[in-house]
Image (cartoon, grey):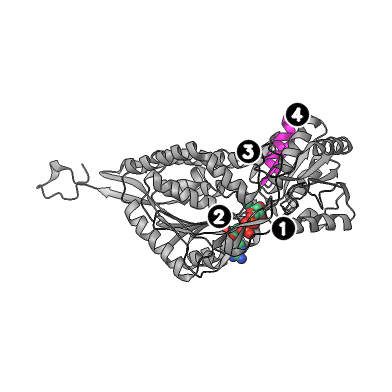
Amino acid sequence: MTSTAATVRTIGHWIDGAEHAPEGTRTSPVYNPASGEVTANLALADEATIEQAIASAQRGYEVWSGYSIAKRQNVLFAFRELLNARKDELAALITAEHGKVLSDAMGEILRGQEVVELACGFAHLTKGEFSENASTGIDVYSLKQPLGVVGIISPFNFPAMVPMWFFPIAIAAGNAVVLKPSEKDPSAAVWMAQLWQEAGLPDGVFTVLQGDKLAVDGLLEDPRVQAVSFVGSTPIAQYIYETAARNGKRVQALGGAKNHMLVLPDADLDLVADQAVNAGYGAAGERCMAISVVLAVEPVADELIEKIAERIGRLRVGDGAADAEPDMGPLITGVHRDKVASYVDLAEADGARIVVDGRGYEVPGCEGGFFFGPTLIDDLPTSSRAYQDEIFGPVLQVIRIGSFAEGVELINSGRFGNGTSIFTNDGGAARRFQHEVQVGMIGINVPIPVPVAYHSFGGWKQSLFGDAKAYGVHGFDFFTREKAITSRWIDPARRGHGDHAGINL
Ligand code: NAD
């Protein structure tokens, strides 16, 4: 049964070192997607709360940016230790509100923790450069300084990892962060704020502003917010990019994806089938790096479809928090499940063959949950919107093609360019693939090529607006600005000799 609004707790903002849920504000329901029950109501920021959050962050910035590198390092290392010791708590929160299975929730925390670990080495990555005697008696050097208050706006699908792509680096570099999490799974953000406080971060340096478009627009319009990092769907990414840029802010806006796996006839089809199932159905396909299209170069399609279908038959779908962990949990909401189903309807109407149909999937004991079974589609015309759009669910499409070149052309003709992969034993083909595809992240016999923390994450085309990727060196560049100083000091030996310039020595 769905709980009523009156019986559930309210999740608030985190402002000035405390949770804060003003009386009488608008709220939005938070669900447990496995049961369909409302488990909390989220306080949505109004103008007064937005002002309070940004003002507190500005004060936090003024304190934190004065901390020495050594003192900042102590806080970063303490945060890393606390996160590592208590990540089980965070994983349980993620599963309860997002629905992904616990091992997936743990996986996203570990990928986020990698960025925390990178940020612990910020002293090296934020130090400037020095050129002695660039001209006679003149030295030139650079300083990297923080920006001030920076906003992070994150999607529902990685409530811990995506904020961690940005905030460890932003904070390490001396900025104050206002995080606006997805309203669908907001608790991870508050948990991480409490952890920062335990780690010794001054109040105001990490703020959580819960909300919807009003909170996002508040961050985009406020002149105290110097930069915005966004991850979410493409239409909103474009809106964020344009609005933030118009308001003179630094902005990186990562959007949606439709990732293809190109399978050449020489590939090991058992390996391909295993990887396609993991990359297509893991986290119920709600990953921006999920594989959603398999391009099978004939004659392998029939055999590959059979192998994938056989593996789908062994997948267990259920409550991600169950003791016997399933392979796949529910989708985030009932509305999203219905949208995914409508794309399968569309594919069918456009002439596709539904090899495995996940519509109407029921999990015994979880009848109210937002489940959608793994779905496999063959013979989908590429003119169908079901091929062209991002579906963001456990739906894998196989497209039969005649050649490597046809595959590259299809990949390059799409509007997204987040990730792609090739499966082959031919090194020359793989090398040509990496050179020719118009995509930001490429896997060679690796289905989900998410770069490690010391490289940077980002796609091309409508998968990334802006020129800075997330984390790695790009992250440090994004969250600092540089000053170049040209300096001349008079040699003490010249003082008092009337030669103040100290030049021509
Ligand atoms: P979304 O675009 O609906 O929401 C993202 C954020 O924007 C949320 O915080 C939301 O509150 C806010 N938002 C939503 N509508 C808004 C509006 N009209 N104005 C201002 N702000 C608004 O995305 P989502 O459904 O939470 O996440 C799924 C999407 O994110 C998918 O498209 C996925 O591909 C993408 N994603 C991309 C990456 C990447 O690295 N490129 C990573 C993760 C997710």
Q: Please name the residue shown 75% across and 41% down the image.
A: 261
Amino acid type at image mark 1: Gly
- Are there few (<14), some (14-19), or many (20+) residues within 10 Å of tag 3? some
Q: Is mark 2 within 8 Å of ligand 1?
A: no
The answer to which of marks 1 and 4 sits earlier in the sequence is 1
Pinpoint residue 215: horizontal percent, then vertical percent: 52, 65
Depth check: give the residue in front, 338 or 398: 338
**Callouts 2 and 1 close, C-beta under 8 Å:** no
Amino acid type at image mark 2: Pro
- From the image, tell me which residue sits under label 2: 186
The answer to which of marks 2 and 4 sits earlier in the sequence is 2
Depth check: give the residue in front, 29 or 473: 29
- From the image, tell me which residue sits under label 3: 103
Secondary structure beneath dot 1 equals helix
Q: Please name the residue shown 63% across and 50% down the image.
A: 98
Magenta span includes 354: no
Pinpoint residue 244: horizontal percent, then vertical percent: 52, 63
Pinpoint residue 374: horizontal percent, then vertical percent: 78, 45
Ligand 1 position by quadrant: bottom right
First to last magenta residue range:
419-438
- From the image, tell me which residue sits under label 4: 425
**Callouts 2 and 4 close, C-beta under 8 Å:** no
